[in-house]
Amino acid sequence: MDLSDRNRGTKRKHSGDKHRGAFVDDVTSVRHFTAPVPDHATIQSTDVGGKDEEHYRTLYNKELNFRALGKQDAELGALLLLKGGSHLDFADPQAVMQLTKTLLRLDFSLRIELPLDRLCPPIPNRHNYILWLKDLVDSTSPSYSPTYEPARRVTGLDIGTGASLIYPLLGCAQRPAWSFIATDVDAKSLTFARRNVELNNLQSRVRVVGRDVDAPLLPLDELDVETIGFVMVNPPFYTSESELLDLARQKSRPPNSACTGASIEMVCEGGEIGFVRRIIDESLKLRTRVQWYTSMLGKQSSLDVLIGILMEHGIDNYAVTAFVQGNKTRRWALGWSFDHKRPSLRATRSSEPTVPKKLLSFPTELTAFQGTLSIIDSENVKRVLCDTMETLDLVSWKWDSDGSRGVGFADGNVWSRSYRRRKERQQQQTTVSSSPQNHETSVNGTETDLKKTPRDVAECAFGFAISVQVERSAHDTDDSIVITIRWLQGQDYPLFESFTGMIRATILRDASISGGNKGVAQSASA
Ligand code: SAH
């Protein structure tokens, strides 16, 4: 990793008042906790764009270079020098803590104070959780935008924020329009967490709240908060002290060091399954008041159990990921939602090789066509797609020719033969009937007013985006075309598959009619 370059980049990106921000988001209304809200211009003027997003995404792709880090941070350098300059002693709590402080300062311009007897967060792992959350939240925006919207205000609840306040710090540093409620039950951690809010000037964006161990984990009503964007937690993983001590022995680390944390941080009734089960129970009551409920998990076996519980409750909109920190410690994370917006493939399945397939939720992207067509036909394909959408009884359809992407919404399977036949009959009846109040039963069996009024697409049973990517060939006239269907909304996976199949059939039929198809259509695959 080129650390000098990395440092230059972050210095430029993070300056002055970047942390001051908002508390109320577009899916959030906070009745009491209203911090000063920056206007649109303030948020947009912060230098957080596509480039920075990529910067954060690849920040810890390579192993840390301690020698280079030590050169940039004298305090870390002093600890490294004792060990020959390129080595960090992970058994030394002071050294581990200094590494955390150094990375926060160099990569995020954050300051932190920590006691030695509380958990010291490993930054690459905690950063992984934030990256995944960004994917989940960005890909399920109320605007259905395919990219990050810097002005979108999102509030997160970090349960058990710890002394470090690590998730609110990392979240606020990367996302100027994000705000946090951070809870904990441990007095010492709460004191340090509040101190870390002040050290980073985040008083208007992070609210630290003390809780009782048995009180609700998601205290939206008590805090007078109506809705929030996400819940996150790194729960106590272990069921007992002895399980914790066994772990410390296996890793040859002293218990209660900066590496392992205090008992309250590591142990709770039922371990992580018990903790997340409580969140699931509360989520069943709060439902869409939180868009994404998420948790990190220390054991893959917990994933099986918790997904089983989600299934029992009919919650199939969930996402799973694995965080690989360095090459030793692996962590998992699970997120679920009662909202019908489906997250991107990257958010739901990026960890496919590390998470067993049976635990993954439905794919949210399918390839409808992949192959080569002539240049004329690549434009033709877009026209055919748009024409086809126009003929369907969609609630809404918008094509963005710059992005070669169209977004549409339907009430159900409006492309099936039976639906079309029914519609034709309906139209015939309309022409013979003089009554403006004519109603007929739709394919779903519901009453449909023939005169459509503008509808909120958020209520539609199916939402999709069609993207056409064309790669021009330098040598001949053949273009390589990929048509991807993204499932944006809905509960009916077969409907999404059926729609993709209809698009594939349409393209193949049209290509053969125009005589330009030289390509091979591939079957739909995630
Ligand atoms: N988020 C920090 C700390 C995680 S350790 C990090 O990732 O490094 C788990 C934290 O949960 C501890 O700080 C512990 O005090 C807190 N905790 C335990 N039970 C809790 C509860 N019922 N409500 C809120 N926080 C709790």
Image (cartoon, rainbow, N blue to C red):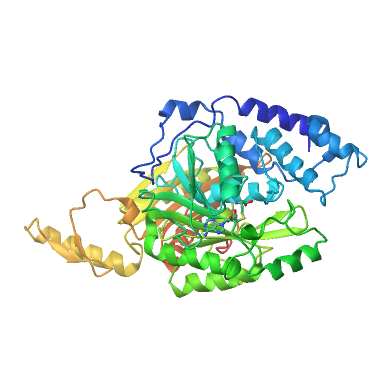
* Residue depicted at 84% across the width and 45% down the height: 88
Foreground of the two, 53 or 273: 273
Foreground of the two, 522 or 269: 269
* Residue 89 locus on image (x, y percent): 85, 48
* Residue 241 locus on image (x, y percent): 68, 67
Quadrant of the rendered image containing residue 115: top right
Q: Is residue 441 left or right of residue 236?
A: left
Image-quarter location of ligand 1 = bottom right
Q: Is residue 138 above or below residue 434?
A: above
The answer to whether residue 367 of the structure is visible from this angle is no
The answer to whether residue 292 of the structure is visible from this angle is yes
Q: Residue placed farthest to the left in the image?
A: 434
Q: Residue placed farthest to the front in the image?
A: 187
Foreground of the two, 142 or 99: 99
Q: Is residue 3 left or right of residue 349?
A: right
* Residue 429 locus on image (x, y percent): 14, 63
* Residue depicted at 64% across the width and 49% down the height: 126
Q: Quadrant of the N terminus?
A: top right
Q: Is residue 340 left or right of residue 8?
A: left
The number of discs equals: 0
Quadrant of the rendered image containing residue 435: bottom left
